[in-house]
């Protein structure tokens, strides 16, 4: 299992959290998703190797922005 923490901008309520969880749960290999609109952090548990770009693209597709860390 691998845990990824992704900073996401634009989540303002529990409904936003649910949109992110539901969208990411459709990606094969993702075991669990937790989203927190207060901290802006999405935690993804993967049971196989998944390209981070696939997750980021899915987040972008539903109207949120992944915050890139330098």
Image (cartoon, helix red, strand yellow):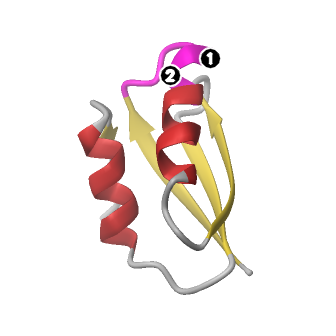
Q: Residue 45, relative to residue 16: is it above or below?
A: below
Please report contact status of discs 2 and 1: CB closer than 8 Å, yes or no. Answer: yes
The secondary structure type at the circle numbered 2 is: helix
Quadrant location of the N terminus in the rendered image:
bottom right
Give the residue pinned by disc 2: 16
The residue stretch that appears in magenta: 10-17
Can residue 68 be seen here? The reply is no
Residue 59 is labelled as: none
Q: Would you call the spot at circle 1 few (<14 residues within 10 Å), some (14-19), or many (20 or more)?
A: few
Which residue is at 31% across, 34% downward?
62
**Residue 68 position within the rendered picture, expressed as x and y whole percent measured from the top left:** 30, 56
Q: Residue at position x 62%, y 38% from top?
A: 35
Q: Is residue 50 magenta?
A: no
Q: Position of residue 14 (x, y in %)?
A: 62, 17
Residue for point 48% across, 15% down: 12
Residue beneath disc 1: 14
Where residue 15 sits in the image (x, y, percent)?
56, 16
Quadrant in the rendering for residue 64: top left
Kindly tell me whether residue 53 is visible in this rendering. Answer: yes
């Amino acid at each position: 299992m691998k845990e990824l923490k992704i900073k996401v901008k634009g989540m303002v309520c529990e409904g936003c959290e649910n949109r992110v969880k539901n969208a990411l749960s459709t990606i094969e290999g993702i075991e669990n998703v937790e989203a927190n609109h207060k901290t802006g952090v999405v935690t993804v548990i993967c049971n196989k190797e998944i390209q981070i770009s696939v997750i980021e693209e899915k987040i972008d597709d539903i109207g949120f922005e992944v915050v890139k860390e330098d």
